[in-house]
Amino acid sequence: MPPKWGPESERNGPEITYGNQNHRGIVGLSVAYHLSQTTEDITVFEIDKSYERASFARSCGGMRSQFSTPANIAMSRHSIDFIQNQTDVEFTPNGYLLLFDATRAEDHDHSLALQQETGASTQSLAPEALQALYPELNTEGLYRGCLTQDGTEGWIDPIALHHWYRDQCLRAGVNIVYDDHRQYPSHASDITVICAGYWTRDVARHFGIEIPVQGEKHTVFQVRTERPVSAGLPLVADLAAGIYFRPEGEGYIAGYEGNNEGEVDDLEPAWASWDELWERLYYRFPGIFDRAKMTGAWSGYYDASTVDQNAIIDEQDGIYFATGFTGRGLMHSPAVGLAVSEMVAGAPLSFDLSAYRLNRASNREKYVI
């Protein structure tokens, strides 16, 4: 069946709502792609063609399996394998370096054991070893650093993955309908899946379902330094300081959890937080950021789970939903698409989704970047 673009037509197959109020998401396209492998007559409703407020397009594209909960580790390992082996999306395999001070020692020890149990090649390095690898690093106050550089962590171009999903969906005959005024899924569909980021909460209320998710605005800064870019650096996150950065082109991109804002409707960057971010970057990596200049910035939204910073993937009253990824929607989109498609089909599940159920016990994810 050829794909249909334009006004909605009569349908009885699965309906994927993944945009609302000018929001655009990648999770819904992944769900549609995975459903299309076994199901026909799928319609995706897209509310915005501009990408203007797209969370995935405003992300840093990070891909990692260093997490503190088994469910997130499993989701990451599947998603990274999928992207590297089943798509043509370029993967930059520079790795991740997570830095811990003494206050995070217990988190480090527990999570490292979890990661290694799954076969991850995460290395735990003492400050001396970190200094030898990264002479630009100030190791004062550090307990350990966790580094993965076996080619399974790094980052991708978010737009490239979105285009890959879209093209695969169109080839499979998925209907993609653009409708700027459509706010809620149709009752004419046999199956409805809502993947609308933090706006999932508002869409779900239309069906009498309360979803504990809220919007959280994050700012990413573009930074130039006088020193040549260390292009081989991993994505570095100092969890105690709440900062991260990675190479990007002729400079770096960096963020700071202190500039996070909740429940805001504008995407104006938090310019005033640059000074604090720079001070923290300079303290931890003086050999890079001693002479740094902020050259630009952008903001995007997290659909933040208010329960425990883990996703919400579930079904209630015949409505399926996937949201609350707290910055991991792009990263986990392949695994989430597979999981939701299996739920819809009533097939055996590839993942233990108990950590993502709506009425779960809290198991807070500690490695949020």
Image (cartoon, rainbow, N blue to C red):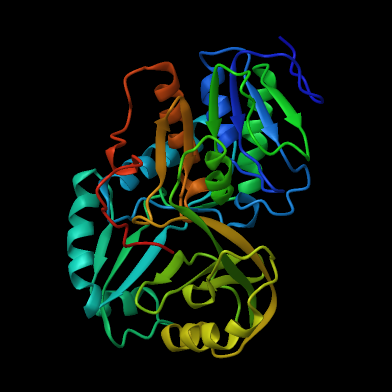
Q: Quadrant of residue 113?
A: bottom left
Residue reaching furthest to the front? 208
The x, y position of residue 42, in whole percent, is 62, 19
Q: How many marks?
A: 0
Residue at (58% x, 48% y) in the render: 199
Residue 199 is left or right of residue 297, and the answer is: left
Q: Quadrant of residue 98?
A: bottom left
The x, y position of residue 20, in whole percent, is 66, 44
The x, y position of residue 340, in whole percent, is 44, 29
Residue 354 is left or right of residue 200, and the answer is: left
**Above or below, 165 relative to 51:** above
Residue 177 is left or right of residue 320, and the answer is: right
Residue reaching furthest to the top? 1
Residue at (47% x, 73% y) in the render: 257
Residue 226: tell me if it is visible.
no
Q: Quadrant of the N terminus?
A: top right
Residue 315: tell me if it is visible.
yes
Q: Nearer the viewer, residue 114 or 224?
A: 114
Q: Nearer the viewer, residue 342 or 307?
A: 307
Residue at (47% x, 58% y) in the render: 94
Q: Quadrant of residue 25?
A: top right
Q: Quadrant of the C terminus?
A: bottom left
Residue 325 is left or right of residue 89, and the answer is: left
The x, y position of residue 293, in whole percent, is 66, 84
Q: Nearer the viewer, residue 232 or 164?
A: 164
